[in-house]
Image (spheres, rainbow, N blue to C red):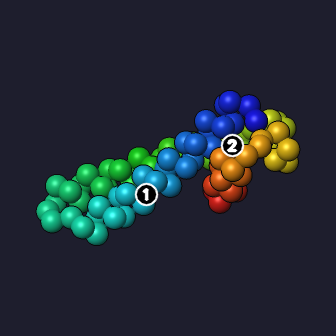
Amino acid sequence: MKTCNELLGRTLQLTDMMVELADLGDGARIDVGCGVLYGLLRDAAYKIRKVAGQEKEDHISRGLWPEETKALKGKAARVFLEAVKKT
């Protein structure tokens, strides 16, 4: 897989983690300031996810996104590809 696609996939994974953290933080917050912080985190995640998703679609339409997993080997590659498929 090209490095640009790998980094794009990792960016999409990061946005998933950002949303999860915002949800957890919002549920555990004790004041308004924390609510603002986690709201900002969630908003940033959605904005980044939108741009990264558009870029992924562009790569797919140009034939730059791999359709098979033959190029990647090992457990880390499988985990990565499963995460990318969820997006």
Q: Position of residue 17 (x, y in %)?
A: 46, 54
Q: Secondary structure at mark 1?
A: helix
How many marks the image carries: the answer is: 2
Q: Out of 82 and 43, give the one closest to the viewer.
A: 82
82 vs 7: above or below: below
Q: Which residue is mark 2?
A: 56
Q: Which residue type carries mark 2?
A: Lys
15 vs 25: above or below: above
Disc with the residue nearer the chain's start (2 vs 1): 1
- Mark 2 and mark 1 in contact? Answer it, CB < 8 Å: no
Q: Which residue type carries mark 1?
A: Val
For label 1, count other residues whose C-alpha is less than 10 Å away and answer few (under 14), some (14-19) or many (20+): some
Q: Position of residue 42 (x, y in %)?
A: 39, 54
Which label sits on residue 85? none
Q: Which residue is mark 1?
A: 19
In the picture provided, is 11 more to the left or to the right than 56?
left
- Most distant residue in the left direction: 31
Which quadrant, please, contains the N terminus?
top right
Q: Position of residue 53 (x, y in %)?
A: 63, 47
82 vs 4: above or below: below
Which quadrant, please, contains the C terminus?
bottom right
Q: Is residue 84 visible?
A: no
- Residue drawn at 29 percent across, 61 percent down: 25
- Residue drawn at 45 percent across, 49 percent down: 45
Q: Quadrant of residue 32?
A: bottom left
Q: Out of 33 and 1, give the one closest to the viewer.
A: 1
Q: Secondary structure at mark 2?
A: helix
Q: Position of residue 2 (x, y in %)?
A: 74, 31
Q: Quadrant of residue 59?
A: top right
